[in-house]
Amino acid sequence: MANELDEMTGPVNKEGKDINVIEKQIKVEVGVGSLIFEIALWVLGIIPGLVFLFMKINARNYFRKLQQRMQQNASQIDNYLEQRVTILQNVVGLVEKSIDLDKDVMKTVAAMRGGVHPNQENRNEVAGQLDAAMSKINVAFEAYPDLKAHAALADAMQQNSYLQREITAAREVYNDTVLRWNSDVFSWPTKMIVAARAGYTTRIPFTASQEIKAQARGKFF
């Protein structure tokens, strides 16, 4: 039998294909077959019925813990973003007297001085603003040898690089938790039945903004 996907002779898109995350939550639903399955367990005897009942209780507790873990993962991303906001403000305070900073950078800092608290609604927007501002500052940082010799500034830029890596890692952890949730809510019978009765849906993983995607495709050198 031939391979269903044959990389040697199968159709190939020479222009490639861009991948996007679909922003859609799929509701978990079960049919009458699941109800018949549960009734059949009780018909077979009280022990099978009770065993499945306890399995459903465990599944319900499992989903509650998984939701809390997802919240903790998201909160960790927000904590790192807030630290980057503080670093941006400190860096601008150190360099704005030495060089003429980009107006967009100053606007970003001015908007954040009132206090920025990343959350589900603005997380991507804050991250994008920080990336753009720090990128422009880094260009100026590399162009001015005197600034590179500034110990406090060099330390701040190093902290920013560290936090960028931590945010990437935290997003991967968050997406792993979302993947586990999205897989488990469709794990029949126990988890899927519990998820359907609770009205659960799939969760949407982290997605990069269109602007960030466009920047990633640009030329860096």
Image (cartoon, grey):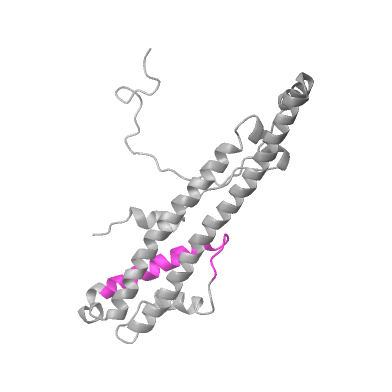
Residue 128 visible to an observer of this rendering: yes
- Residue, x 41% and y 56% (percent of image)? 168
Count every numbered label the image shows and give the total: 0
User: Against 151, is 218 above or below?
Assistant: above
Residues in magenta, as a range: 117-141
Q: Position of residue 47 (x, y in %)?
A: 74, 26
**The C terminus lies in quadrant:** bottom left
Magenta-drawn stretch contains 137? yes
User: Against 205, is 58 above or below?
Assistant: above
Residue 89: quarter of image? bottom left
Q: Position of residue 194 (x, y in %)?
A: 69, 37
Magenta: main secondary structure equals helix
- Residue, x 31% and y 69% (percent of image)? 158
Determine the residue located farthest toward the front in the rendered image.
47
- Residue, x 29% and y 75% (percent of image)? 154
**The N terminus lies in quadrant:** top left
